[in-house]
Protein backbone atom coordinates (compact mmCIF):
# COMPACT_ATOMS: atom_id res chain seq x y z
CA UNK A 1 0.00 0.00 0.00
CA UNK A 2 1.09 3.53 -0.50
CA UNK A 3 0.58 6.43 1.82
CA UNK A 4 1.41 10.02 0.98
CA UNK A 5 4.47 11.11 2.87
CA UNK A 6 3.96 14.66 4.18
CA UNK A 7 7.31 14.81 5.89
CA UNK A 8 9.42 13.82 2.89
CA UNK A 9 10.96 10.98 4.87
CA UNK A 10 11.85 7.83 3.03
CA UNK A 11 9.00 5.33 2.93
CA UNK A 12 8.75 2.71 5.59
CA UNK A 13 8.75 -0.98 4.65
CA UNK A 14 5.63 -2.20 2.88
CA UNK A 15 2.81 -2.49 5.35
CA UNK A 16 0.42 -5.40 5.35
CA UNK A 17 -2.73 -3.52 4.72
CA UNK A 18 -5.01 -5.35 2.42
CA UNK A 19 -6.17 -8.23 0.39
CA UNK A 20 -4.36 -9.42 -2.63
CA UNK A 21 -4.74 -8.32 -6.17
CA UNK A 22 -1.70 -6.78 -7.51
CA UNK A 23 -1.88 -3.48 -5.99
CA UNK A 24 0.36 -1.22 -4.13
CA UNK A 25 -1.57 0.75 -1.62
CA UNK A 26 -1.17 4.19 -0.28
CA UNK A 27 -2.27 5.41 3.10
CA UNK A 28 -2.89 8.58 5.06
CA UNK A 29 -1.50 11.88 4.07
CA UNK A 30 -1.69 13.94 7.21
CA UNK A 31 -0.32 13.26 10.62
CA UNK A 32 -3.51 11.56 11.69
CA UNK A 33 -4.61 9.99 8.45
CA UNK A 34 -3.33 10.10 4.92
CA UNK A 35 -4.32 8.96 1.44
CA UNK A 36 -3.51 5.38 0.74
CA UNK A 37 -2.49 3.79 -2.53
CA UNK A 38 -2.73 0.23 -3.76
CA UNK A 39 -0.66 -1.00 -6.68
CA UNK A 40 -1.84 -4.27 -8.16
CA UNK A 41 0.60 -5.64 -10.63
CA UNK A 42 -0.13 -8.86 -12.40
CA UNK A 43 3.14 -9.11 -12.73
CA UNK A 44 -5.19 19.76 -2.22
CA UNK A 45 -6.70 21.69 -4.77
CA UNK A 46 -10.46 21.56 -4.80
CA UNK A 47 -12.05 21.66 -8.24
CA UNK A 48 -15.78 21.64 -8.81
CA UNK A 49 -17.39 19.81 -11.70
CA UNK A 50 -18.25 22.02 -14.67
CA UNK A 51 -22.02 22.18 -14.62
CA UNK A 52 -22.45 23.66 -18.09
CA UNK A 53 -20.88 21.03 -20.27
CA UNK A 54 -23.03 17.97 -19.94
CA UNK A 55 -24.47 15.67 -22.55
CA UNK A 56 -27.28 13.26 -21.76
CA UNK A 57 -25.83 10.70 -19.34
CA UNK A 58 -22.22 11.70 -20.03
CA UNK A 59 -20.44 14.75 -18.73
CA UNK A 60 -17.84 16.51 -20.84
CA UNK A 61 -15.00 18.04 -18.87
CA UNK A 62 -14.08 21.55 -19.98
CA UNK A 63 -12.11 24.12 -18.05
CA UNK A 64 -13.31 27.24 -19.89
CA UNK A 65 -15.84 29.54 -18.27
CA UNK A 66 -18.72 29.00 -20.65
CA UNK A 67 -20.72 31.95 -19.32
CA UNK A 68 -18.04 34.29 -20.62
CA UNK A 69 -18.11 32.97 -24.18
CA UNK A 70 -19.53 35.19 -26.91
CA UNK A 71 -21.57 32.47 -28.55
CA UNK A 72 -24.62 30.78 -27.13
CA UNK A 73 -23.62 28.31 -24.44
CA UNK A 74 -26.27 25.75 -25.38
CA UNK A 75 -25.00 25.60 -28.95
CA UNK A 76 -21.45 25.25 -27.66
CA UNK A 77 -22.49 22.39 -25.43
CA UNK A 78 -24.05 20.61 -28.40
CA UNK A 79 -20.93 21.12 -30.52
CA UNK A 80 -18.63 19.95 -27.74
CA UNK A 81 -20.85 16.95 -27.08
CA UNK A 82 -20.86 16.06 -30.77
CA UNK A 83 -17.06 16.04 -30.91
CA UNK A 84 -16.79 13.87 -27.82
CA UNK A 85 -19.37 11.36 -29.03
CA UNK A 86 -17.79 10.80 -32.46
CA UNK A 87 -15.22 8.14 -33.36
CA UNK A 88 -12.31 7.72 -35.77
CA UNK A 89 -11.91 4.65 -38.01
CA UNK A 90 -8.55 3.24 -39.06
CA UNK A 91 -7.62 -0.12 -40.60
CA UNK A 92 -11.08 -1.50 -39.96
CA UNK A 93 -11.07 -0.60 -36.24
CA UNK A 94 -12.85 2.17 -34.32
CA UNK A 95 -11.03 4.62 -32.02
CA UNK A 96 -11.99 7.56 -29.83
CA UNK A 97 -12.04 10.94 -31.58
CA UNK A 98 -11.72 13.18 -28.52
CA UNK A 99 -7.96 13.68 -28.09
CA UNK A 100 -7.52 11.22 -30.95
CA UNK A 101 -4.34 9.17 -30.65
CA UNK A 102 -3.88 9.69 -26.92
CA UNK A 103 -5.01 6.11 -26.23
CA UNK A 104 -3.63 3.68 -28.84
CA UNK A 105 -6.15 0.84 -28.59
CA UNK A 106 -9.56 0.64 -30.31
CA UNK A 107 -12.91 1.09 -28.56
CA UNK A 108 -15.09 -1.04 -30.87
CA UNK A 109 -17.11 -4.14 -29.99
CA UNK A 110 -14.25 -6.67 -30.23
CA UNK A 111 -12.13 -4.54 -27.89
CA UNK A 112 -15.03 -4.11 -25.47
CA UNK A 113 -15.53 -7.87 -25.43
CA UNK A 114 -11.82 -8.33 -24.67
CA UNK A 115 -12.12 -5.79 -21.87
CA UNK A 116 -15.12 -7.66 -20.46
CA UNK A 117 -13.13 -10.91 -20.53
CA UNK A 118 -10.25 -9.29 -18.63
CA UNK A 119 -12.70 -8.02 -16.02
CA UNK A 120 -14.13 -11.51 -15.53
CA UNK A 121 -10.67 -13.11 -15.43
CA UNK A 122 -9.49 -10.72 -12.73
CA UNK A 123 -12.54 -11.42 -10.60
CA UNK A 124 -11.89 -15.16 -10.96
CA UNK A 125 -8.19 -14.71 -10.23
CA UNK A 126 -8.82 -12.69 -7.06
CA UNK A 127 -11.86 -14.69 -5.89
CA UNK A 128 -14.28 -11.91 -6.65
CA UNK A 129 -12.41 -9.01 -5.06
CA UNK A 130 -13.23 -5.66 -6.60
CA UNK A 131 -10.67 -3.86 -4.45
CA UNK A 132 -7.84 -4.75 -2.09
CA UNK A 133 -7.92 -1.56 -0.06
CA UNK A 134 -9.46 -2.16 3.37
CA UNK A 135 -12.37 0.20 2.80
CA UNK A 136 -15.59 -1.09 4.29
CA UNK A 137 -13.79 -4.07 5.88
CA UNK A 138 -12.92 -5.01 9.45
CA UNK A 139 -14.57 -1.94 10.91
CA UNK A 140 -12.95 0.48 8.44
CA UNK A 141 -15.11 3.27 7.11
CA UNK A 142 -17.20 2.82 3.99
CA UNK A 143 -16.01 4.84 0.99
CA UNK A 144 -18.04 7.95 0.20
CA UNK A 145 -16.38 8.95 -3.08
CA UNK A 146 -14.69 6.65 -5.63
CA UNK A 147 -13.18 7.55 -8.99
CA UNK A 148 -12.19 5.09 -11.73
CA UNK A 149 -9.57 6.63 -14.03
CA UNK A 150 -9.60 5.14 -17.53
CA UNK A 151 -12.82 3.25 -16.86
CA UNK A 152 -13.38 1.96 -20.41
CA UNK A 153 -16.80 0.35 -20.65
CA UNK A 154 -17.38 1.04 -16.97
CA UNK A 155 -17.83 -2.56 -15.84
CA UNK A 156 -15.69 -2.12 -12.73
CA UNK A 157 -17.25 1.31 -12.08
CA UNK A 158 -20.77 -0.10 -12.09
CA UNK A 159 -19.78 -3.09 -9.96
CA UNK A 160 -18.21 -0.70 -7.44
CA UNK A 161 -21.39 1.39 -7.41
CA UNK A 162 -23.43 -1.70 -6.60
CA UNK A 163 -20.94 -2.91 -3.98
CA UNK A 164 -20.87 0.50 -2.26
CA UNK A 165 -24.40 1.93 -2.70
CA UNK A 166 -23.74 4.81 -0.30
CA UNK A 167 -20.75 6.02 -2.32
CA UNK A 168 -20.65 8.39 -5.26
CA UNK A 169 -18.77 6.55 -8.03
CA UNK A 170 -17.35 8.41 -11.04
CA UNK A 171 -15.82 6.87 -14.17
CA UNK A 172 -13.51 8.86 -16.45
CA UNK A 173 -12.50 7.84 -19.97
CA UNK A 174 -11.66 9.27 -23.39
CA UNK A 175 -14.22 7.02 -25.11
CA UNK A 176 -18.00 7.48 -24.68
CA UNK A 177 -18.67 3.73 -24.58
CA UNK A 178 -20.28 3.42 -21.16
CA UNK A 179 -23.77 1.89 -20.80
CA UNK A 180 -26.86 4.07 -20.50
CA UNK A 181 -28.49 2.22 -17.60
CA UNK A 182 -26.58 2.87 -14.40
CA UNK A 183 -26.98 2.53 -10.65
CA UNK A 184 -28.21 5.87 -9.23
CA UNK A 185 -24.86 6.52 -7.53
CA UNK A 186 -22.74 6.04 -10.68
CA UNK A 187 -21.93 8.62 -13.36
CA UNK A 188 -19.41 8.95 -16.15
CA UNK A 189 -17.38 11.80 -17.58
CA UNK A 190 -15.51 11.98 -20.89
CA UNK A 191 -12.11 13.51 -20.21
CA UNK A 192 -8.36 12.97 -20.53
CA UNK A 193 -6.89 11.72 -17.25
CA UNK A 194 -3.45 12.95 -18.35
CA UNK A 195 -4.50 16.60 -18.27
CA UNK A 196 -2.59 18.57 -15.65
CA UNK A 197 -5.79 20.37 -14.66
CA UNK A 198 -7.94 18.07 -12.54
CA UNK A 199 -11.67 18.74 -13.01
CA UNK A 200 -13.20 15.81 -11.18
CA UNK A 201 -13.53 17.08 -7.62
CA UNK A 202 -11.55 16.07 -4.56
CA UNK A 203 -11.79 14.12 -1.31
CA UNK A 204 -11.87 10.69 -2.91
CA UNK A 205 -11.64 7.70 -0.61
CA UNK A 206 -10.46 5.50 -3.48
CA UNK A 207 -8.78 6.23 -6.80
CA UNK A 208 -8.87 3.11 -8.96
CA UNK A 209 -6.70 2.62 -12.06
CA UNK A 210 -6.71 -0.63 -14.04
CA UNK A 211 -4.98 -1.61 -17.31
CA UNK A 212 -4.21 2.03 -18.05
CA UNK A 213 -0.75 2.85 -16.71
CA UNK A 214 1.01 0.87 -19.43
CA UNK A 215 -0.61 3.02 -22.10
CA UNK A 216 -0.36 6.55 -20.74
CA UNK A 217 2.54 8.86 -21.42
CA UNK A 218 2.33 10.98 -18.28
CA UNK A 219 2.09 8.59 -15.29
CA UNK A 220 3.62 11.25 -13.04
CA UNK A 221 0.76 13.66 -13.77
CA UNK A 222 -1.93 11.01 -13.24
CA UNK A 223 -0.49 9.79 -9.94
CA UNK A 224 0.29 13.26 -8.57
CA UNK A 225 -3.23 14.46 -9.37
CA UNK A 226 -4.55 11.35 -7.66
CA UNK A 227 -2.39 11.99 -4.59
CA UNK A 228 -3.57 15.58 -4.33
CA UNK A 229 -7.25 14.65 -4.48
CA UNK A 230 -7.40 11.67 -2.14
CA UNK A 231 -8.98 12.30 1.24
CA UNK A 232 -6.88 11.65 4.37
CA UNK A 233 -7.04 7.91 4.93
CA UNK A 234 -7.99 7.27 1.30
CA UNK A 235 -6.39 4.84 -1.13
CA UNK A 236 -5.16 4.53 -4.69
CA UNK A 237 -5.18 1.09 -6.28
CA UNK A 238 -3.46 0.22 -9.56
CA UNK A 239 -3.92 -3.12 -11.32
CA UNK A 240 -1.75 -3.99 -14.30
CA UNK A 241 -0.61 -7.05 -16.22
CA UNK A 242 3.08 -7.73 -16.70
CA UNK A 243 4.07 -9.01 -20.12
CA UNK A 244 6.59 -11.52 -18.79
CA UNK A 245 6.48 -15.20 -19.67
CA UNK A 246 7.55 -17.27 -16.66
CA UNK A 247 7.67 -20.93 -15.69
CA UNK A 248 6.45 -22.20 -12.33
CA UNK A 249 9.44 -24.53 -11.92
CA UNK A 250 12.06 -22.11 -13.33
CA UNK A 251 13.00 -24.48 -16.15
CA UNK A 252 12.29 -22.12 -19.05
CA UNK A 253 15.48 -21.31 -21.00
CA UNK A 254 16.25 -17.70 -21.91
CA UNK A 255 15.98 -18.52 -25.62
CA UNK A 256 12.53 -20.13 -25.33
CA UNK A 257 10.78 -18.85 -28.51
CA UNK A 258 7.54 -17.58 -26.88
CA UNK A 259 9.60 -15.78 -24.24
CA UNK A 260 11.82 -14.17 -26.88
CA UNK A 261 8.72 -13.19 -28.85
CA UNK A 262 7.15 -11.39 -25.88
CA UNK A 263 10.41 -9.63 -25.10
CA UNK A 264 10.55 -8.31 -28.65
CA UNK A 265 6.90 -7.27 -28.50
CA UNK A 266 7.70 -5.31 -25.32
CA UNK A 267 10.64 -3.62 -27.05
CA UNK A 268 8.49 -2.66 -30.04
CA UNK A 269 5.69 -1.29 -27.88
CA UNK A 270 8.21 0.65 -25.83
CA UNK A 271 9.30 2.49 -28.97
CA UNK A 272 5.81 4.03 -29.21
CA UNK A 273 5.48 4.82 -25.52
CA UNK A 274 3.70 1.67 -24.30
CA UNK A 275 5.24 0.10 -21.19
CA UNK A 276 4.38 -3.58 -21.56
CA UNK A 277 5.83 -4.43 -18.14
CA UNK A 278 4.61 -1.46 -16.11
CA UNK A 279 3.24 -3.69 -13.35
CA UNK A 280 6.73 -4.45 -12.07
CA UNK A 281 7.81 -0.81 -12.31
CA UNK A 282 5.02 1.18 -10.70
CA UNK A 283 6.51 1.53 -7.24
CA UNK A 284 8.99 4.34 -8.13
CA UNK A 285 6.19 6.31 -9.80
CA UNK A 286 4.03 5.97 -6.69
CA UNK A 287 6.88 7.03 -4.43
CA UNK A 288 7.61 10.05 -6.60
CA UNK A 289 3.96 11.11 -6.36
CA UNK A 290 4.27 11.07 -2.56
CA UNK A 291 2.86 7.69 -1.59
CA UNK A 292 4.55 5.54 1.01
CA UNK A 293 4.10 2.07 2.50
CA UNK A 294 3.63 0.60 -0.95
CA UNK A 295 2.43 -2.98 -1.02
CA UNK A 296 2.56 -5.04 -4.19
CA UNK A 297 0.65 -8.27 -4.71
CA UNK A 298 1.42 -10.48 -7.67
CA UNK A 299 -0.87 -13.14 -9.12
CA UNK A 300 0.48 -15.73 -11.58
CA UNK A 301 -1.84 -16.11 -14.56
CA UNK A 302 -1.76 -19.43 -16.38
CA UNK A 303 -1.56 -19.64 -20.16
CA UNK A 304 -2.60 -22.85 -21.85
CA UNK A 305 -4.26 -26.09 -20.75
CA UNK A 306 -2.41 -26.99 -17.57
CA UNK A 307 -4.48 -24.80 -15.23
CA UNK A 308 -6.85 -26.78 -13.02
CA UNK A 309 -9.44 -24.11 -12.12
CA UNK A 310 -11.03 -21.12 -13.82
CA UNK A 311 -9.12 -18.80 -11.51
CA UNK A 312 -5.86 -20.21 -12.90
CA UNK A 313 -6.71 -19.73 -16.54
CA UNK A 314 -6.00 -16.96 -18.96
CA UNK A 315 -6.13 -17.88 -22.61
CA UNK A 316 -4.68 -15.68 -25.31
Image (spheres, rainbow, N blue to C red):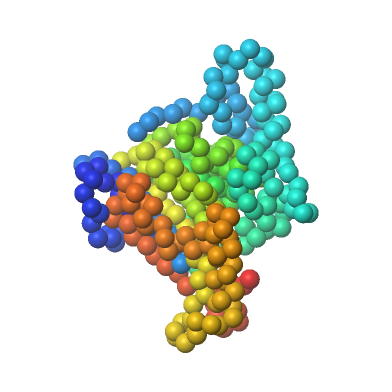
Considering only vertical position in the picture, is 22 above or below 196? Answer: below
Q: Residue lying farthest front?
A: 271
* Residue 184, horizontal then vertical, whole percent: 56, 38
Where is residue 117, by image quadrant?
bottom right
* Residue 285, horizontal then vertical, whole percent: 39, 52
Residue at point 62%, 39% (across, down): 99
Task: State the count of labels.
Answer: 0
Q: In this view, does 51 lie to the left or right of 4?
A: right
**Most foreground residue, 110 or 289:** 289
* Residue 165, horizontal then vertical, whole percent: 48, 44
**Most foreground residue, 313 or 282:** 282
Q: In this view, does 191 lie to the left or right of 93?
A: left
Could you tell me if residue 291 is visible in this image?
Answer: yes
* Residue 257, horizontal then vertical, whole percent: 59, 81
Residue at point 53%, 26% (across, down): 63
Residue at point 59%, 32% (across, down): 59
**Most foreground residue, 5 or 126:** 5
Residue at point 23%, 45% (across, down): 8
Instruction: Give the quarter of the figure containing the N terminus.
Output: bottom left
Could you tell me if residue 233 is visible in this image?
Answer: no
Considering only vertical position in the picture, is 115 above or below 61? Answer: below
**Most foreground residue, 312 or 199:** 199
Considering only vertical position in the picture, is 43 above or below 239? Answer: below
Instruction: Give the quarter of the figure containing the C terminus.
Output: bottom right
Amino acid sequence: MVVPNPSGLSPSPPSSQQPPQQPPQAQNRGPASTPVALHLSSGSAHHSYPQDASSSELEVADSDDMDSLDFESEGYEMELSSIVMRHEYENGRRFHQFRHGRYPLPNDDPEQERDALKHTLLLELTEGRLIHAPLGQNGNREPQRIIDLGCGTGRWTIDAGEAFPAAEVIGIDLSPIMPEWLPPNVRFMVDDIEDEEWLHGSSFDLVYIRHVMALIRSPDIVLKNSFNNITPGGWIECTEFDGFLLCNDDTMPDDHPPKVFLERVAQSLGSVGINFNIGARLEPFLEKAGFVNIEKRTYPVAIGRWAKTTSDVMRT
